[in-house]
Image (cartoon, rainbow, N blue to C red):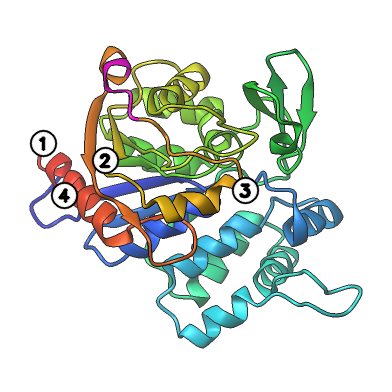
Amino acid sequence: MGKNEEPKVVVLGGGTGMPVLLEGLKKYPIHLSTVVTVADDGGSTGKIKEEMDIPAPGDIRNVIVALSTADEELNGLFQHRFDEGETLSGHAVGNLVLAAMKSLTGDFYEAVEKVADMFKVKGDIFPIVNESVVLHAEMTDGTIVSGESNIPHEHKIISRIFLTPENIEPNPKVVQAIHEADLVIISPGSLYTSILPNLILGGVVKALHQTNAKIAYVCNVMTQHGETDGYSASDHVKAIDSHIGKGVLDTIILHDDIIDPEVLQLYKEEQATPVPFDENALRELDIEVMQADIVDYSGQMIRHNTKRITDILYKMACEESKK
C-alpha cells in the first residue's frame, strides 16, 4: 500500500449488529466495503422477496442508512414503516424503494448502487448475491428447517446452515474486495442466520483462505435463544470454523467487563445470557484474543459501543496496511 492510500476494510454481516460498526467506521479515513446478507425472509422484507423473487432488501436498507451522509429527514423517510392500510401495513419505505429500483434497472446489484448514491453513502455496499436465496439449517437430530425466520423458533441445536440454490456464486466484487483488503471484519449478529450466510459461499470461503488481510471477528456479547444457547466465545469460533475451515480467523474481539445486572434482567425474558470468555479453549484454537470494555448501555438493550469498537478496528486496519 502506498503512503497516501487509506486502509482497505471489508465488513461482512447483517442484522442489527452490523450497522453499529458501520456508523462508526464511516467516520474514519478508510476505504470501506460492506458485504450484506440477503437471506432474510421475515416481515416486509420477506413479502417483497417472495412476491418479486428478489434478494431480501431489509438488511441492505439498514446498511444504507448506517453509511448515509444524507439529510437525517431523508434517512428517517427511508426507514419509515407503514402501520396502516391492508396492503402497505408493515412495509418499510426503503424496502419498497429498493424493490422499485430493481424493477427499473433489472439488476439488484445496480439497484443497490443507485440507491446508495442517492444517500451519499460512505464506501461500497455489496449484496452477497444477486438473486433470491433460501437459508436452511440442519439440526443435530437430522431435521432440516427452511427459512431464515423459522430457524431460531425450532429451538434445536444447529449443526450447519446452507443456501439454495446450491453452488450459487457471490458478487465478484465481494471476492475482489476480500483479496485486496487489509482488514476483514466479521460483524456481530445472529451467528447462523445473519453472519454465516455471507461466509459459506464457495467463492467467499476461497477468498478468505487466500487473502493476506487480517480477519477479525467481533464476537456477540449475549447468546441468542434458538441459535447460540449456551455458546461460549470458543463455540462461536468453532461454528465458523466448521463452515469455512480452520485457520481463517486471526483475531476475536471480546467484551471483558461485568455486565450491569439490571440490564441482564431484561434478557432473562429472551433466555439470553452473556457469552462466556473461555480463554484456554480459545488459545487452543490458535486465535489472537483482544479484550476491551466495548458495551453501550445507553439503550434498553445491550449493543457494542460504536466509538470504542471502531477505534480498535481502525487501529488494527492501520497496522495491517503498513505491513
Q: Earlier in the sequence, mark 3 or mark 1?
A: 3
Kind of residue indicated by mark 2: Asp
Residue stretch in magenta: 277-281
Q: Secondary structure at mark 1?
A: loop
Q: Which mark is residue 315?
A: 4
Q: Nearer the viewer, mark 1 or mark 2?
A: 2
Distance of label 1 from label 4 (alpha carbons): 13 Å
How would you classify the magenta stretch by its main secondary structure?
Answer: helix
Within 10 Å of the Cα at label 1, are there few (<14), some (14-19), or many (20+) other Cα atoms? few
Kind of residue indicated by mark 4: Lys
Residue drawn at point x = 44 percent, y = 55 percent: 262
Residue 256 in sight here: yes
Residue drawn at point x = 39 percent, y = 52 percent: 33
Q: Which mark is residue 256?
A: 2
The residue at which mark 1 appears reads as 323
Q: Nearer the viewer, mark 1 or mark 4?
A: 4
Q: Which mark is residue 182?
A: none
Kind of residue indicated by mark 3: Glu
Q: Check the picture and name the quadrant holding the N terminus.
A: top left
Q: Earlier in the sequence, mark 1 or mark 2?
A: 2
Give above or below for 236 relative to 33: above
| Percent x, y of residue 131 | 70, 45
Q: Earlier in the sequence, mark 4 or mark 2?
A: 2
Front-lying residue, 141 or 145: 141
